[in-house]
Amino acid sequence: MKCPSVIAVLSISLAMASSAIAEPVSNTLAARTELRAIETLTLSDRQFLEGDANGKATTTAGELRIAAGAGRLPVVVFQHGSGGVGANIEMWEREFNAIGVSTFTLDGLAGRGLTQVITDQALLGRLNFILDIYRALDVLAKHPRVDSRRIALMGFSRGGHAALYASLTRFHKMWNKSGIEFAAYIPFYPDCATAYISETDVADSPIRIFGGALDDYDPIAPCKAYAERLKAAGRDVEVTEYPRAPHSFDDPHLGPSLVVVDGQTVRHCIIREEPRGVLIDAYTKEPFTYKDSCVEINPHVGFDPTATEAAKVSVKKFLKTVFKLHGD
């Protein structure tokens, strides 16, 4: 026969276990996760720019993390950089799930037989990610738990380039058949070295660019210059620059400063689309390639906890406004 004290301990333990089952362990965890196939194409940049759909049929994938809550929820679409889905994206997923925002993380590499393009950017035309993003909207438009009026786009590095230029009206007209427009564009440390035709004709949604003053991978200066051109055209755009932040400043798995050995950077390139569909090296006046003399290697990346925390506050505040979320 068990003594009363043992029975009491067992009762308390069972009560605690029941409580743990009844209540979620953490509000940063998604209530449900789904993997979704995305039917897209693999194109050269010229094909993308000219609206030529005669590319290779490709199936990529996205991970939809549905936040806790009822009905149709807002969603942030994530586009990774040249190295694939990193630890920073999981961090952002949890931050957004915690405020009732679902996330849809795209993988633009695995379905194309790639793991990274850091050391050879020519393996994949950089505009493919924009097409993948639009095709992701096709998937989200049909989902019963997604509020199609409240979808934002957030990208990092190469994915930041895609998140920035996916706003171009010209690209939407050629490639976005979903009937959905993004509610906001949030590029993190994007490459802004390329000037596309009609670059200031962008969607009416706000654009918020984040980067670091110490970024020698995708320097923020060209992005600031582009933002000024957008502002002059009457667009809603802001740039947030963190004074001590390097490239990938929001990746908690990185040290404070690491060399990306053999990583390619166009930090000193000026690339222009002229004529339509052709990307030109402004120095040589010839079609741009990653063998051009302006392409360099060995840039740096690094984690900046101060900039990361500041960015979390800014981005969540921005999204709460855009998505009309209530609460702190």
Image: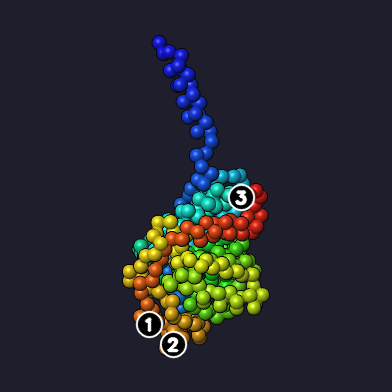
- In primary-sequence order, the first of circles 1 and 2 is 2
Q: What residue type is labelled 1?
A: Asp
Is 43 drawn above or below residue 141 in the view shown?
A: below
Q: Which residue reaches farthest top? A: 1
- Tell me, yes or no, whether the two marked residues, 3 and 2, touch with CB atoms within 8 Å: no
Instruction: Name the element at disc 3.
Output: loop
Disc number for residue 283: 2
Q: Residue at 45% x, 70% y: name it.
A: 215
Q: Quick check: can you spot residue 2?
A: yes
Q: Nearer the viewer, residue 17 or 166?
A: 17
Is 313 drawn above or below residue 1 in the view shown?
A: below
Q: Which of label 3 and label 2 is nearer to you?
A: 2
Mark 1–mark 3 distance (CA, rounded to whole Å): 48 Å
Q: What residue type is labelled 2?
A: Tyr
At which x and y percent is residue 14? 47, 25
**Circle 1 residues within 10 Å: few <14, some 14–19, many ≥20:** some
Find disc 1 in the rendering and name its residue.
292
